[in-house]
Image (cartoon, helix red, strand yellow):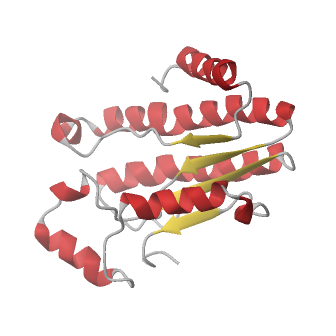
Amino acid sequence: DVAQPAEIDRLVDEAWQAFGRVDLWVNNAGADILTGGALHQPFADRLQVLLDVDVRGALLCSHGAGQRMKAQGGGQIINIGWDQALTGGVSTESGQLFAASKAAVIGFSKALARGLAPEVRVNVVSPGWIETEWGETVNRELYERVRRQTPLARWGTPDDVAAAAVFLASDEAAFLTGQVVNVNGGVVM
């Protein structure tokens, strides 16, 4: 449970105990405030969930893993952002909450990249409209509108997001740190 600092400490400790060295750390935990009963929770409750999981969890995991990576002489951290975090492009309450939480992750990642350099690289993959279980719940009208407004004329796939992370983790990205890679078909440029 990345909302619990003690659990994060245990996770980081166990990762280094199991592998001796960790070269890549990806923070991909995210809270669901869009489906089921979560959608109908009060604004403040949904905010707290996102702050606990999406922000606090990513920041504490990055900090813990980053300190170990710096001490071991190298490593890479990839955080997951959101392409609309810095543009405010989705004006719903959920959009406001995600923008705030993911903007925090992006800002922290940039500062952490400076703080851990040159030993550790820190980057962000920021997906846009991706065909996931959540994406399957949107109505057909919204689905088609998003597709039409996307320069590459389709929704992204989990494989598109994974490919960006694999690239950032590769030697081909060895001169990238503090960067945000938007995986969104050109919706945000």
Question: At 43% from the left edge and 70% from the top edge, which residue is drawn?
Answer: 184
Q: Looking at the rendering, which quadrant does residue 69 occupy?
A: top right
Farthest residue to the front: give it.
Answer: 19
Determine whether 160 is above or below 150 in the image: above
Q: Nearer the viewer, residue 96 or 67?
A: 67
Q: Position of residue 51 (x, y in %)?
A: 47, 36
- Residue 67: image x %, image y %? 78, 31
- Count of numbered circles on the image: 0
Horizontal side of 107 relative to 42 (left or right) equals right
* Relative to 65, 67 lies left or right: right
Asked whether residue 4 appears in the rendered view, the answer is yes
* Residue 47, position as x, y percentages in the image: 39, 38
Nearest the eye: 168 or 44:
168
**Quarter where residue 58 is shown:** top right
Residue farthest along the left direction in this orientation: 140
Q: In the displayed structure, does residue 156 sit left or right of residue 101?
A: left
Front-most of 94 and 171? Answer: 171
Identify which residue is drawn at 58% across, 21% down.
11
Residue 105, position as x, y percentages in the image: 57, 47
* x 71%, y 40%: residue: 23
Does 46 appear above or below 93? above
Using the image, determine if residue 32 lies above or below residue 125.
Answer: above
Q: Residue at x 61, y 36 (%)?
A: 59
Which quadrant does the N terminus fall into?
A: top left
**Residue 85 in view, yes or no:** no
